[in-house]
Amino acid sequence: MKTFDADETWETKAGDMDKEIKLIKERKNDLFPQGRDNCKKFLRECKEKGFDIKIKAKKTKPYWTWYYEVAQPAIVTMTLAGLPDFCKDHESDQAWDGRPDSVEKELGLVDKRKDDKYPQGRDEVKKFLGLCKEKGYNFKIKAKKTKPHWTWFFEVVA
């Protein structure tokens, strides 16, 4: 997710998106580098999914330039990346915190644990870990003792 410089920044709740869409229409001379229609579509999607947003305004002469971003980057990015199962809370017998610098180790362990279970899918877990490494996200590793092998879950750390 790209971030933009701004002179002013504030957050807006998902319930206020209609007001923001109306303001885009009223700011006829201002600039929207992400595209006016794209911004309105983005705000409607955030409202529908209950995501809060950051509004960033930069004073550019003679008008303002406006940008919109999701306010909860890790969870929302994971969800938008098609990984909502990794945002759920899974029951476990043991849990550990993972960091971006431990991803390679975890990938090796996923490959090594050939008989263990990964309900989220081995390939999806690898994709998730790759995204954590790329974006710098921390994650949680959860293990549940199931016979005869362990069951592993990975989650987003909010």
Image (cartoon, rainbow, N blue to C red):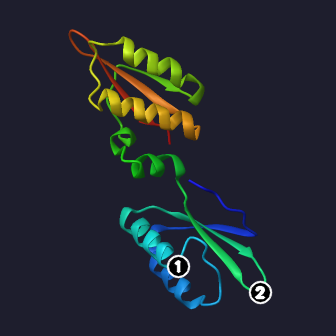
Q: In this view, does 94 lie above or below 35?
A: above
Residue 22 pos. (x, y %): 50, 86
Identity of the amino acid at label 1?
A: Arg
Which residue, given by chain and number where applicable, does mark 2 sit on?
A: 62
Q: Does label 1 or label 2 sit earlier along the sequence?
A: 1
* Disc 1 crowd, CA 10 A, few/some/many (<14, 14-19, 20+): some
* Residue at the spot 52% in from the left edge and 53% down from the top edge: 72
- Res 148 visible: yes
Q: In which quarter of the image is residue 28?
A: bottom right
Q: Is residue 151 above or below residue 66?
A: above
Q: Is mark 2 on a helix, strand or loop?
A: loop
* Residue at the spot 64% in from the left edge and 67% down from the top edge: 10
Residue 128 pos. (x, y %): 43, 35
- Res 16 visible: no
Identity of the amino acid at label 2?
A: Pro
Which residue lies most toward the left here? Answer: 147
Labels 1 & 2 near each other (Cβ < 8 A): no
Q: Which of 119 and 142 is in front in this view?
A: 119
